[in-house]
Image (spheres, helix red, strand yellow):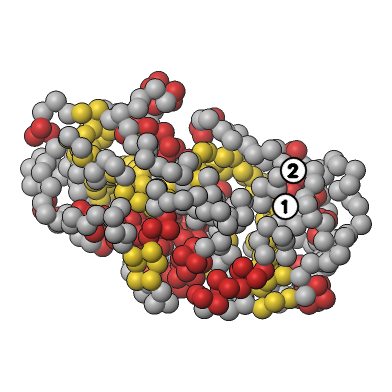
Amino acid sequence: MPPTGTDAATGAVTSAVPDAAPDDVPDLAPSLAPDSVASAAPDSVTDVIVVGAGVIGASVALELAKLGLRVTVVDKAGGVGHGSTSASSAIVRFNYSTRDGVATAWESQHCWERWPDHLGFRDPAGPARFHRAGMAMLDVPVAPRGRMTRLFDQVGVPYEEWEPATLAARIPGIDPGRYWPPRPVDDDRFFDDARGAVGALYTPDAGYVDDPQLAAQNLAAAAAHRGARFVLNRAVTRIHTRGDRVGGVTLSDGTRLTAPVLVNAAGPWSGALNRLAGVGAEFTVGVRPMRQEVHQVTAPASWTGPGETRPAVADMDLGTYLRPAPGGRLLVGGTEPECDPFDWVEDPDAARPHATASRFRAQVTRAARRLTDLTVPNTPSGIAGVYDVADDWTPIYDRTDLDGFYVAMGTSGNQFKNAPLAGRFIAALVAGVEAGHDHDAEPLSYHCEHTGHIIGLAAFSRKRPVNADSSGSVLG
């Protein structure tokens, strides 16, 4: 959710608003126990404020509520998962450029497979479902297969290496031609003959979640079951501090919420919220909002044979990706090829929410070059979302230099799949740092419940070196 008002919109506010009276903010107990705030009405005083009710914010709320904390989630939207989450393709894959990124996605897949168990609550609306469809990532120079297989071997992700003939046999109707580098569809060279052939790295345990908004709502329902409160249709207009610590927020309707901890999970509005709090000067990784489209078309006949489940396809060779969808449909998105201008936005609220004819034509034409019997409709169908993109397409899950202010941001359109772990990372950070641990000097780690891996949270630090191995795209 964005901070509102002239100052927030223009970025002119560069510091939080200090409170005049020190007793406006309750003292912190040595640990954040539920009784750490003893005075003031329960509707205005809480242990933690989470800003943002997308899939990341809802996951954070659940994990903090599991610690026994009183959690209040605030969002300007009218419902849970109405922002970037609703525009997600919700692909669950493991192709990341770092060992910790791969390990996070692999552990998260186990959470999606056991979704009701992860929630610990039976949502009357029913659970979102994970479909184990597999994913084929086509060979491309900027993401060498060998780099991926080394990481998969370290983490224990099963995979198959497909040569071009295997790719053609396993995905009927696919053209295994190599066309690198991607070109604009109006470039005369776009339809040049293939220059060789591509194989693929196939991961059978990948797949997708059928309803990303429902997944966020499942998390929110589980959090609410544990006592979390959701305050919707209200934006943060001021952030209050007490000395060097967060003290609370004022909302657009004048409501004042008091808390010693705030988690910024505001998605594409997270940078504006940081500026409102006066944090971020120490970040070595920048974050900017980017608009991206996901299109929906009728899948070709070769894709929808009786009893067939086709895998998702990551095709950086042409600059697109494909994902099966219920009802014989196909989702088509882009992988930010260098030949296409990035659609950066200054104000996420002003971004067009619908698919454009030009971007639809470009991405679906690329998909049709790969799937030879896919047709390109004249009328665009799809949605657009805005994502907070980090310089290296790797998220920031960390504390900040303002005590009590934490961030789950820079998710770059590739962290839906990791939402189960993002919540647990933030909970581990809050529990450790608020108990006195110096995470900057001695970074915390997370011990995975399902896979047993140890994930170093320094990989997601606000002060990390920019990841030089990043693909420079949504693939991370």
Residue in view at x 67 percent, y 41 percent: 355
Position of residue 463 relative to residue 19, above or below, is below
Q: Taking 330 as reference, is 254 left or right?
A: left
> Mark 2 falls on what kind of element?
loop
Residue in view at x 57 percent, y 43 percent: 385
Q: Are marks 2 and 1 in contact (CB under 8 Å)?
A: yes
- Tell me which corner region of the image, top left, top right, bottom left or bottom right, holds residue 16: top left
Q: Earlier in the sequence, mark 2 or mark 1?
A: 1
Residue in view at x 13 percent, y 47 percent: 28
Residue in view at x 66 percent, y 47 percent: 336
Position of residue 30 relative to residue 310, above or below, is above
Q: Taking 338 as reference, is 99 left or right?
A: left
Residue named by callout 2? 339
- Tell me which corner region of the image, top left, top right, bottom left or bottom right, holds residue 308: bottom right
Kindly report which numbered mark, 2 or 1, lies closer to the viewer in this rendering. Answer: 2
Q: Taking 387 as reference, is 315 left or right?
A: right
* Of residues 348 and 309, the one drawn nearer to the viewer in this rendering: 348
- The answer to whether one can see residue 434 in this image is yes
Residue 443 rendering spot, x and y as whole percentages: 32, 59
* Of residues 458 and 319, the one drawn nearer to the viewer in this rendering: 458
> Mark 1 falls on what kind of element?
loop
Residue 58 rendering spot, x and y as whole percentages: 37, 53
Q: Which amino acid type is marked by label 2?
A: Cys
* Of residues 52 and 336, the one drawn nearer to the viewer in this rendering: 336
Image quadrant occupied by the C terminus: bottom right
Q: Which amino acid type is marked by label 1?
A: Gly
Residue 237 rendering spot, x and y as whole percentages: 33, 29
Residue 458 rendering spot, x and y as whole percentages: 38, 58
Question: How far apart in space, not on screen, are marks 2 and 1 (Cα)?
Answer: 9 Å
As drawn, the label of residue 319 is 1
